[in-house]
Amino acid sequence: MSPADFKRPGSLYGAVDLGARKQAMEAQAKREAAAREGGGTAAQVIHADDATFATEVVERSMNSLVLLELTVTRAEQAKEYSLLLDKLAAENAGRWALVRVDVETSPQIAQALRVQNVPAVYAIFQGQPVAVAPGIATEEQLRDWLSQLMQALAQYLPPPGEGAPEGDQAAPEPQAEPEIIAAEQAIDAGDLDGAVAAYERLLARSPNDVDAKLGLAGLGLIRRTQDVDPADVQRRLADPADIEAQLLAADFEMLSGEVDAAFDRLVAVVRRTSGEERDRARVHLLGLFDTLPAEDPSLARARRNLASALF
């Protein structure tokens, strides 16, 4: 890759691309309709083992919350606890996934998490454990723990179902949000701060708005790179210890539309680093995921590669 390979686009890739915006809006409408049609059904419990952990838990957690239940299925006390979790999962269908692992047949998972006692429940989000349920909790304790967890992750989770729509009337055509229009006008005028403010106003009111998330993530790319010399980044890439150069190079690749190259670069950094540097590259990569609609085929490939690099 040469300095000339770093291109600055005429528009904000991922922020104001109208095709991507239309795709995201249509996909969001389909997801909401599917959620309404499936309201009230029992949640599916996913069974995982050492071989499927990366796919069923790590990869799944990259864009949704996973509750990982570590248990011994033959134990009566554990069975009662599992039934309680099944009940809570059904009540929260669509907001998080319940994955069950029998530690007797899959000991590597328990060893990796340093589990002392089972049953145990871990909340996994974006590839990392973010919370642990308090021991063998009562239903009241579990509900309280879940409530706090849902509140902490509210901006990342789908809203609770609102029930099925009445009749067979077609859904109304989505109307453009005033803040989206204001953001695009600010971008056209070169006012990035104004565009960021407009997207943030919309997210404060609608935390799961797809357009605002895409736009804000795309603007982040522009703001991080607007005062950076691509030639300087290229020179710095000669030093493998310069993690900042790798992050900036990935940003420039995203802006040039080289999505897979950017993702592969950061996955490689995650694979060869550890500790704070590894986590920094992982978080940066997750931020780049936010610049694309959820249905983009490059995301599924990158999430699989990231899961493989992490575990």
Image (cartoon, rainbow, N blue to C red):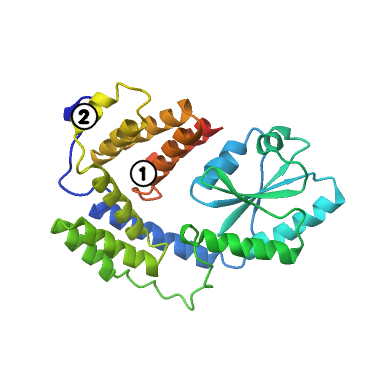
Residue closest to the far right? 76
Give, as a three-letter code, the residue at label 2. Answer: Asp
Q: How many marks?
A: 2
* Residue at the image position 69 percent from the left and 32 percent from the top: 108
Position above or below: 144 against 290 = below
Residue 103 in view: yes
Instruction: State the residue position of label 1.
Output: 288
- How far across and down, in percent of the image, does residue 88 sit? 68, 62
Residue closest to the far bottom? 166
- Of label 2 and label 1, which has the lower sequence position? 2
Position above or below: 251 against 169 = above
Give, as a three-letter code, the residue at label 1. Answer: Leu
**Which of the numbered marks, if any, corresponds to residue 232?**
2
Mark 2 surroundings: few (<14), some (14-19) or many (≥20) residues within 10 A: few
For this view, does 201 lie left or right of residue 134? left
Q: Distance between the residues labelled 2 and 1?
A: 22 Å
Position above or below: 282 against 13 = above
- How far across and down, in percent of the image, does residue 128 sit? 55, 43
Q: Quadrant of the N terminus?
A: top left
